[in-house]
């Protein structure tokens, strides 16, 4: 090794002598799996215990159906069955329902009287001296097939405990939950230094001047999809498709959606999921979660914001959508966004897919 000292305490050497810098260090932190329970046989409870103290939790709930029609799934923290919960929820865009001083959080709404799978994503703030606040969304398959609409729910709740951190989460069904039903708990804390992120980046594709953008990836049980469109050439709605080996353009999609807090509308036996009800050329940001079990219809939830007219003088538009792809034989390994009314995406947008088993 040859290093030469120069004036001003400078050194000169070859690239082999250059030290490793922090830019080469792996990223740290992020959502890490801290607990999981998968039912090996039907049971009313899915208990995830011995959770480490994390400031925030992200909970993935995916059941395979319930033993009785109209069964609901409630959430209990630290095994507390006292009257220490309250909640506010909305099903299918209807009027809010509330309950106070109840023995469990109304965690996941099963919708109509059907015994079909439910998928939910929830977030919980976990500070020992504060009431524990919880929010999330869920989608229910409802009757099988693309000719039947899924159902959706939004929920906010609290556990009125100001002396403990969360150490266990129980999903309690009012009837037995089917074998294979699962709760996965992810944790995040500002002090985390791990590199074991639950969400693995599977694909990243930039938009070009084209009508569609497609990402292909290795299949995973849980998918998190984000898409940023910075605009398009023709005022157009945004549509979403999925597939295995190729994009499915058949009439195998069904969705339920609300725009700007309006009444829910449905689209049955469609050849895609329509992402927004209005036509714009302006930027959009889309966030999607999906459960991707090969033997079940694929359930997903979408939140979309549209810039609308530029400037602070015009409100954005929003849309919430619950959808399903009525395929029960294969996992999704590609997704597509496209403009069904002939527009072309502006270059510079990005489609990203994360996933995990």
Image (tube, grey):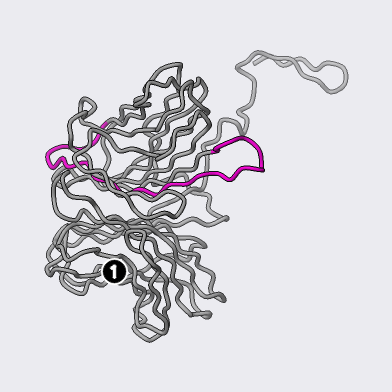
Q: Quadrant of the C terminus?
A: top left
Q: Which residue is mark 1?
A: 171
> Residue 242: x and y, percent?
26, 33
Residue beneath the point at 25% across and 63% down: 111
> Residue 36: x and y, percent?
30, 59
Q: How many marks?
A: 1
* Residue neighbourhood size for the residue with mark 1, other residues' Cα within 10 Å, grouped as few (<14), some (14–19), many (≥20): many
Q: Quadrant of the N terminus?
A: top right
Residue beneath the point at 70% across and 14% down: 13
Asked whether, in this view, residue 326 is left or right of residue 335, the answer is left
Residue beneath the point at 16% across and 37% down: 330
Where is residue 79, by image quadrant?
bottom left
Where is residue 12, by image quadrant?
top right
Q: Hey, which residue is sitting farthest right in the picture?
A: 8
**Is 128 placed above or below 348 here?**
below
**Front position in the image: 127 or 249:** 249
**Is 70 placed above or below 237 here?**
below
What range of the chain is rendered magenta?
307-333
Helix, strand or loop for disc 1: strand
Secondary structure mainly formed by the magenta segment: loop
């Amino acid at each position: 090794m040859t290093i030469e000292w120069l004036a001003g305490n400078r050194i000169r050497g070859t690239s082999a002598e250059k030290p490793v810098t922090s830019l080469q260090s792996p990223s740290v932190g992020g959502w890490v799996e801290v607990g999981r329970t998968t039912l090996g046989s039907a049971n009313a409870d899915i208990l995830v215990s011995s959770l480490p103290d994390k400031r925030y939790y992200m909970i993935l709930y995916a059941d395979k159906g319930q033993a009785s029609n109209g069964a609901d799934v409630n959430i209990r923290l630290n095994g507390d069955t006292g009257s220490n919960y309250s909640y506010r929820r909305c099903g299918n865009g209807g009027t809010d329902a509330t309950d106070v001083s109840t023995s469990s959080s109304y965690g996941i709404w099963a919708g109509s009287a059907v015994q079909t799978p439910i998928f939910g994503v929830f977030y919980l703030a976990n500070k020992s001296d504060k009431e524990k606040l919880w929010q999330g969304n869920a989608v229910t398959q409802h009757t099988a097939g693309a000719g039947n609409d899924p159902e959706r729910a939004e929920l906010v709740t609290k556990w009125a405990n100001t002396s403990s951190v969360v150490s266990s989460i129980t999903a309690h069904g009012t009837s037995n939950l089917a074998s294979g039903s699962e709760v996965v708990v992810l944790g995040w804390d500002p002090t985390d230094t791990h590199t074991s992120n639950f969400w693995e980046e599977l694909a990243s594709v930039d938009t070009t001047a084209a009508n569609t953008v497609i990402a292909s990836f290795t299949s995973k049980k849980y998918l998190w999809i984000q898409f940023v469109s910075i605009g398009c050439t023709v005022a157009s709605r945004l549509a979403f498709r999925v597939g295995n080996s190729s994009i499915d353009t058949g009439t195998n999609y069904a969705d339920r959606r609300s725009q700007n807090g309006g009444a829910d509308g449905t689209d049955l036996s469609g050849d895609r999921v329509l992402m927004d009800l209005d036509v714009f050329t302006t930027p959009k940001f889309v966030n999607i979660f999906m459960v991707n079990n090969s033997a079940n219809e694929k359930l997903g939830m979408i939140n979309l914001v549209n810039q609308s007219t530029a400037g602070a003088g015009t409100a954005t538009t929003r849309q919430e959508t619950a959808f399903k792809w009525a395929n029960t034989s294969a996992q999704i390994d590609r997704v597509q966004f496209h403009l069904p009314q002939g527009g072309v995406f502006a270059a510079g947008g990005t489609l990203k897919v994360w996933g995990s088993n």
